[in-house]
Amino acid sequence: MSPLLLKTLLSLAVIVAALALSAMLRRVARRLGQQRDFARARIFQMSVVINVLCLVLALLLLGAVWGLSGDGVMVFATSLLALLGVALFASWSMLSNATAAIILFFSAPYRIGDRIRFLDGDNTVTGRVRHMGLVFITLEDEHGHHYTLPNNLLLQKTVIRLNSQNSTLPADQKHCR
């Protein structure tokens, strides 16, 4: 068998495996999202993240199949990482928020429609979750005001999921209005 045919078949196998892995992980995310009654937009966002990760993995494996030299790859990777390091330093919070969105998707401490209280010292917010995206969550209070909170803060601060049957708030006097 010629080396070119072997590389072509291995490339085809990598592509098929990446597509199969992506489809399987998207199906798992969709099933999990439907079981937990997530909004379709949240399930779609996780599908996009899964597709991007599978694409990066497939590109790395295709590079290995076609014999990219380790030296050339390392020079390219360090140059790219240096450039990305400068770019991501400016937008580190965006990456942190996207990572927090993935954690919130799979852990599902609350969902759209739940009433929560976000405790952050004097900046306490109580409201109903209206939107959960890759970067932020939107709360609406009883007066119709909308609050946008970064996802990473929801993992760092205390969040109380309020009982929907009981409209009274917890009796912590420091945080009651």
Image (cartoon, helix red, strand yellow):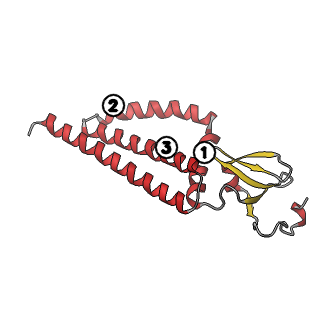
- Of the pair 132 and 87, the residue shown nearer to us: 132
Element type at mark 3: helix
Distance from disc 1 to disc 3, alpha carbons, whole Å, reads: 11 Å
Position of residue 4 relative to residue 13, above or below, is: above
Which is closer to the viewer, label 3 or label 2? 3
The location of residue 6, given as percent across then percent down, is: 16, 40
Say which residue appears at 36% left-offset and 51% top-offset. 21
On screen, residue 172 versus residue 53, left or right, reads right
Identified by mark 1, the residue type is Leu
Which is closer to the viewer, label 2 or label 1? 1
- Residue that badge 1 annotates: 134
Position of residue 137 relative to residue 173, above or below, is: above
- Residue that badge 3 annotates: 48
Identified by mark 3, the residue type is Val
Element type at mark 1: loop
Which quadrant of the rendered structure holds the C terminus? bottom right
Would you call the spot at circle 2 few (<14 residues within 10 Å), some (14-19), or many (20 or more)?
few
Distance from disc 2 to disc 1, alpha carbons, whole Å, reads: 34 Å
The location of residue 88, given as percent across then percent down, is: 58, 36
- Of the pair 164 and 57, the residue shown nearer to us: 164
The location of residue 1, given as percent across then percent down, is: 8, 40
Tag shown at residue 72: 2
Distance from disc 3 to disc 2, alpha carbons, whole Å, reads: 30 Å
Identified by mark 2, the residue type is Gly
Instruction: Choose the circle earlier in sequence order: 3 or 2.
Output: 3
Would you call the spot at circle 1 few (<14 residues within 10 Å), some (14-19), or many (20 or more)?
many
Say which residue appears at 71% left-offset and 59% top-offset. 114
- Of the pair 88 and 154, the residue shown nearer to us: 154
Residues tagged 2 and 1 counted as in contact (Cβ below 8 A): no
